[in-house]
């Protein structure tokens, strides 16, 4: 194993990068070779120079995108392990042998109940509280349209939401006349006090990100539970947008206390694209009303005008389903469990700590995401020097250095989504490249 500081020269570009990155504990500098210039199949991200634990090395071998380039886009779209995609493809091929054959249908029909049960077990819900969706956005829209909104009713969101948790409220505003209020969820604000300030006798729903895609802030579970209690006492529905939650931070639906939680399989859980879940508290199933329904939502029906809905959250599902994708979603969670959620989250946090430390020691850069371990997540947000355009930076890094990261809403903010399969070296190299391009 090469000692950490034994790397050859870095590509000469920008001034003094080695100086400001030197001395950061464990901060190893890689020779910077734009990934775009590597031969096919060649990778600079095999982590060989870094003393990676075996379980990380094995995981990286199974996730092709993890070694194809420094991959900091899990918060945008997560890469999947090869075995997950193979199992999905096998199941699709199996189904296609004869989709209507009873022995095939029997196997395919087990996929959804098994996935609901797995999601329930891993993320603290009851099996009957899980609906399978195709995205976080689908879950959010189901929740947004579940109330009989009256003009001037109010929803509370925050100043750091993804469009998925903004557009539905704009639509409801324009169609039904609701009002939107906003709280400040910048790092360090008091969640409960912020919401309390915006509550009125017209508030009917609070809908916030569990983890902000823009500033990386995680709502503390205890704070969320306190907020839930307060909202329940006022009969205000509480929804969390958990697109960035499961697989990124510890996530327990019951402990968070919210009424509804929307999430997806295709980010931090490394599942197939177009998979998601909505958790709805059992006691609220009849109050979180359906706006879309169809075959699959009902338990009984006739053609005389009668029907009963499924007694579980599966009532929010309808139509023919992408069962092989859901099989892949289940396999992805299984892969994460086999890898170990606890060590995944632990390593992600260590890497984020490393990134924070490196940014602190880098003149011109600062940390825009929370630094307190209780508030942070795998989303590390770098505040760029004045005049550095995050969108241009994103394009340049992707095209010329093969580093995949993302601009976010803050006009000088740049996001590194750090998952456990990333390495310290990748983070250090990305920061070097950022500084160099912003110089
Ligand atoms: C906080 C947040 N909510 C919702 C979404 C949309 O997720 P999906 O594509 O699963 O609908 C994203 C995607 O980046 C997100 O970051």
Image (cartoon, grey):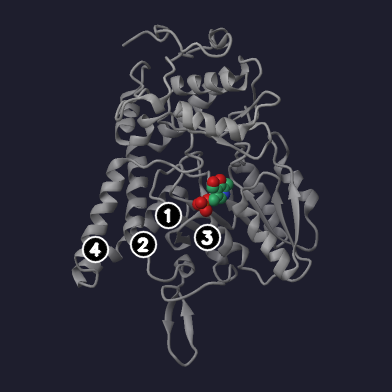
Distance, label 1 to label 3, CA atoms, is 10 Å
Task: Work out whether mark 1 precedes mark 4 in sequence or the reverse, and give the earlier one.
Answer: 4
Residue at 33% over, 19% down: 48
Q: Is the residue marked by circle 2 packed among few (<14), some (14-19), or many (20+) residues within 10 Å? A: some
In percent of width and height, residue 292 lies at: 53, 72
Question: Disc 3, disc 4: CB below 8 Å?
Answer: no
Does label 2 or label 1 sit earlier along the sequence?
1
Answer whether labels 2 and 1 touch (C-beta < 8 Å): yes
Q: Is residue 318 left or right of residue 326?
A: right
Identify the mark nearer the N-term, 3 or 4. Answer: 4
Badge 1 density bin: few <14, some 14–19, many ≥20, Cα 10 Å: many
Q: What's the CA distance linking mark 2 and mark 4?
A: 11 Å
Image quadrant for the N terminus?
top left
Label 4 sits on residue: 95
Q: Estimate the spatial distance between the alpha carbons at disc 3 and disc 4, rounded to whole Å.
A: 26 Å
Task: Kindly identify which residue carries mark 3.
Answer: 138
Of marks 2 and 4, which one's residue comes earlier in the chain? 4
Number of the label disc, if any, that sits on residue 275: 1
Identify the secondary structure beneath mark 1.
loop
Contact flag, marks 1 and 3 (Cβ < 8 Å): no
Pointers 1 and 4 in contact (C-beta within 8 Å):
no
Q: Which residue is mark 2?
A: 322
The span from disc 1 to disc 4 (Cα, nearest Å) is 18 Å
Q: What secondary structure is found at the residue carrying circle 3? A: helix
Q: Residue at left 53%, top 44%?
A: 244
């Amino acid at each position: 194993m090469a000692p950490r500081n034994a790397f050859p020269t870095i590509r000469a570009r920008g001034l003094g990068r080695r100086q400001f990155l030197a001395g950061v504990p464990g901060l190893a500098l890689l020779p910077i070779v734009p990934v775009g210039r590597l031969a096919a199949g060649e990778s600079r991200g095999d982590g060989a120079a870094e003393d990676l634990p075996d379980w990380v090395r094995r995981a990286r071998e199974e996730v092709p995108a993890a070694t194809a380039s420094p991959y900091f886009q899990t918060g945008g779209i997560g890469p999947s392990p090869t075995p997950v995609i193979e199992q999905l493809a096998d199941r699709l091929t199996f189904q296609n042998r004869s989709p209507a054959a009873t022995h095939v249908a029997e196997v395919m029909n087990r996929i959804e109940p098994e996935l609901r049960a797995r999601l329930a077990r891993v993320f603290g819900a009851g099996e009957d509280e899980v609906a399978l969706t195709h995205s976080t956005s689908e879950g959010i829209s189901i929740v947004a349209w579940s109330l009989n909104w009256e003009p001037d009713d109010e929803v509370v969101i925050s100043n750091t939401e993804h469009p998925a948790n903004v557009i539905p409220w704009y639509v409801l505003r324009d169609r039904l006349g609701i009002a939107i209020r906003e709280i400040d969820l910048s790092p360090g604000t008091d969640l409960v006090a912020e919401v309390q300030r915006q509550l009125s006798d017209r508030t009917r729903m609070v809908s916030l990100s569990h983890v902000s895609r823009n500033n990386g802030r995680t709502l503390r579970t205890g704070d969320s539970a306190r907020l839930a209690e307060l909202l329940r006492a006022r009969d205000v529905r509480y929804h969390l947008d958990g697109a960035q939650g499961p697989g990124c931070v510890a996530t327990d639906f019951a402990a968070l206390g919210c009424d509804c939680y929307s999430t997806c399989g295709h980010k931090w859980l490394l599942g197939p694209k177009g998979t998601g879940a909505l958790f709805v508290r059992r006691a609220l199933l009849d109050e979180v009303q359906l706006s879309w329904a169809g075959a699959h939502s009902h338990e009984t029906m006739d053609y005389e005008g009668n029907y009963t809905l499924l007694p579980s959250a599966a009532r929010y599902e309808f139509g023919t389903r992408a069962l092989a994708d859901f099989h892949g979603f289940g396999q992805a969670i299984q892969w994460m469990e086999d890898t170990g959620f606890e060590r995944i989250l632990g390593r992600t946090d260590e890497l984020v700590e490393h990134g924070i430390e490196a940014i602190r020691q880098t003149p011109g850069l600062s940390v825009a995401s929370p630094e307190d371990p209780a508030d942070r997540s795998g989303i590390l947000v770098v505040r760029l020097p004045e005049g550095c355009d995050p969108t241009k930076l994103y394009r340049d890094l992707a095209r010329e250095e093969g580093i995949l990261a993302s601009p976010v809403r803050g006009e000088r903010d740049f996001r590194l989504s750090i998952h456990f399969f990333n390495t310290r070296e990748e983070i250090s190299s990305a920061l070097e490249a950022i500084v160099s391009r912003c110089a």
